[in-house]
Amino acid sequence: MKLPKVYNPKTVEGKIYQLWEKSGFFNPDKLSAAKKKKKIKKFVVAMAPPNITGSLHMGQALENTLVDILVRKKRMEGVKVLWLPGIDHAGIATQNVVEKELKKEGKTRFELGREKFIERVWQWKKKYGNIILDQLKKLGASCDWSRTRFTMDEDYARAVKKAFLYYWKKGWIYLGKRPVNWCSRCQTSLSDLELEYEEKKGKLWYLRYPLKIKDKRLKMKDEHIVVATTRPETMLGDTAVAVNPSDKKYKKLIGEKAILPQVHREIPIVADRLVDPKFGTGAVKVTPAHDLKDYEIGIRHKLQMVQVIDEKGKITKNAPPPYQGLKADEAREKIIKDLKKLNLLEKEEDYTLPIPKCYRCGTIVEIIPSRQWFLKMDATHPSPSLKQIAIEAVKSGKVRFHPKNFEKIYFNWLKNVRDWCISRQIWWGHKIPLKGENDVLDTWFSSALWPFATLGWPKETGDLREFYPINLISSARGIINLWHARMIFSGIEFMKEIPFSQVYIHPTVLTKEGERMSKSLGIGVDPLQLIEKYGADATRLGVTWQITGGQDIRFGEEDMVMGKKFCNKIWNASRFILMNKSPLINADKLRRFTLIKSKSLTQADRKILKALERTVKSVTRDLENFRFGQAAQILYHFFWHDFCDKYIEESKSQKEKENTQKILYYVLLTSLKLLHPFMPFVTEEIYQKLPLKNKKKFLMIETWPK
RNA sequence: GGGCGCGUAGCUCAGCUGGUUAGAGCGCAUGCUCGACACGCAUGAGGUUCAGAGGUUCGAGUCCUCUCGCGCCCACCA
């Protein structure tokens, strides 16, 4: 058997993956270990389902490499392993992609109509939906593909429906007219979490509202009350002016009225604690229809909601005629001009403020009142609130975050959480299961059910019984509030048990310059190109190598070079050992204690065996504690320097040939086992060539060294 | 405004609960066709000693305080 001098991943990876897939060992039911014992440990991971819109990005490559490392190690430890893959329908994102495609044909979704459009999205899904999963195979991900789920599958839709109706019957879902974030391009509401803010230079305008004093005894020096605003056009919908109750400056004015310029509406001056007396003039205009905080003030003081901006971002008929039909920013200019003429603009200051934008299309988000469905987060009847149970699950330690400090983000968000607006005005998604409803559910409503809906819920399937609760969820940190929190309360609410016990938040992959990778801006690294260039093993080792401490990693391609060289090193060390024309050794007999007993061990023999033992222990421990980079580096150092540089060199001149040979094989085999989770392809390829008797069919299902 | 984190070799980063000459990968220098590997081997340079200042301690990259620089998350300052 002659092996090439240089390891070539291209001739190996595809072939090996096929063998694995065919073997069925990705499926826990087919693992021989699982068949033998009755009571067996389980390890279940649900993949964070990628969208059907994209191709694999660096973050996902990292995430799934790390999960695969854990999964492969557990499988070798004889644990019954299920890694359940899947994809998410990603409502808004997918709809936008398909709309873009339509645009190329000069069509809009409205011309197509709802049904035809949805058909079109399904076509898209069929064509592109699984691309990302195929890409994960290139990475070497050992998922049970036979259990792949999609959030719009029929079974899954049943789960969504069941969950909605459950909350509905409980009285926790209600219909409300509320100001919501509204994207005038996507024509849908957005949750707070779907906004992106961009710092922008703007102005703070000081507007004079003439006073109408009822109480003649009051002698006011000023005839106006001055309010500061960054959005003067919303004044058309003002229904009050508010001041802080403790603000002495305005005490006398509370209960009085002001006249809204141009609109000529009388509006009350109210006192509310939400007003910061130090900002601007200490008096604010209140527009309950177009500002969340003003809406709250409005509720407290029973103010009217006057909607002056519509779904298209234009001024409504509720405003005076000269402004009707203008776009919001046009209206702003006109109002400033008009007020200036009337000497009602006191001054303007430069002011930088964050502008909310739609995270999908970048359009500036308006806040408009809209009829939406909400899920109560705070309701404590007839059972503890969703908020409470979500907090409790983590507080009690039943769900643990790694690294732990992410629990703070979690608690912090939940503490201030508002009712969840679960309706979206798009077409692609789960329809709200009530008569006459056209709206669709927020994508995250279905994602929240992921750990159990993927196992068959609401049906009482064998999988559900066997695999719930799952062990691990791994994701980027950005979706702790969007996803994890909601999975946790959903799991407890529907399954009466926490959905998972561990959360691993992996670092964010930044560019070498420290920028966020962004596909739309063309910034970043394509993991598929890395695999093409260096091979999957090298790519895996390279990214894993960088997972050391901090929150972010600045991606360096040099580590892929390192990974590639290391593949070659493993390859050649194996080649050397194989060249020794070994007698067929029984794999079972290659055990440490038989070697250690031998009286003729040299110093070098003892040293390498000792180092190997240390390495086994620390790699095992590191992986249990999510210290991936540490584990990889220790292994690398052991294999390259202790084994290759020292022992193999030494072995060339050792006299006890047979002993030396056994040790070479023993250390190689054990190293391959340890390396396999990190670099599954090369190690498997070499394992297949080892001239040992009683081998397992695959290294993938060999026993993890102890 | 609140929270989290980072600042250690030219670059990217390790250094856990404080303890001998501070480590890795890549890069760099010099020399190597010796029975696997030049994607290799050997040797080595490189940190004013770990952003800066102060403190705790027998002893501090490692704990505390402050300052400077950078990043991220959350938030109802119009």
Image (tube, helix red, strand yellow):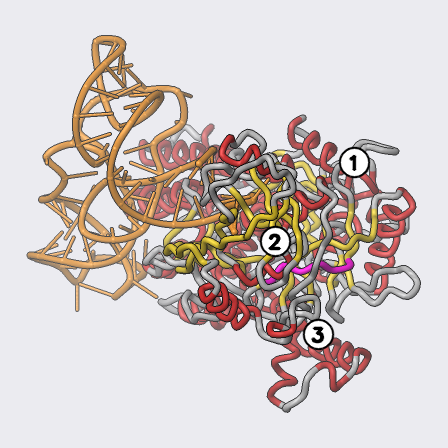
Towards the viewer: A580 or A593: A593
In the picture of the structure, the residue carrying the numbered disc 2 is A259
> Could you tell me how far apart the alpha carbons at marks 1 and 3 are, in whole angstroms?
33 Å
Left or right relative to A148: residue B66: left
In the picture of the structure, the residue carrying the numbered disc 3 is A125
Q: Quadrant of the C terminus of chain A?
A: top right
Q: Earlier in the sequence, mark 1 or mark 2?
A: 2
In the picture of the structure, the residue carrying the numbered disc 1 is A497
> Could you tell me how far apart the alpha carbons at marks 1 and 2 are, in whole angstroms?
57 Å
The chain containing the residue under callout 2 comes to A
Q: Amino acid at mark 3?
A: Lys
> Could you tell me how far apart the alpha carbons at marks 2 and 3 are, in whole angstroms?
56 Å
- Residue neighbourhood size for the residue with mark 2, other residues' Cα within 10 Å, grouped as few (<14), some (14–19), many (≥20): many
Between disc 1 and disc 2, the foreground one is 2
- Note whether residue A596 is visible: yes
Q: x, y percentage for residue A507?
A: 47, 48
Q: x, y percentage for residue A228?
A: 48, 50
Magenta extent: A366-371
Location of residue B21 (image quadrant)? top left
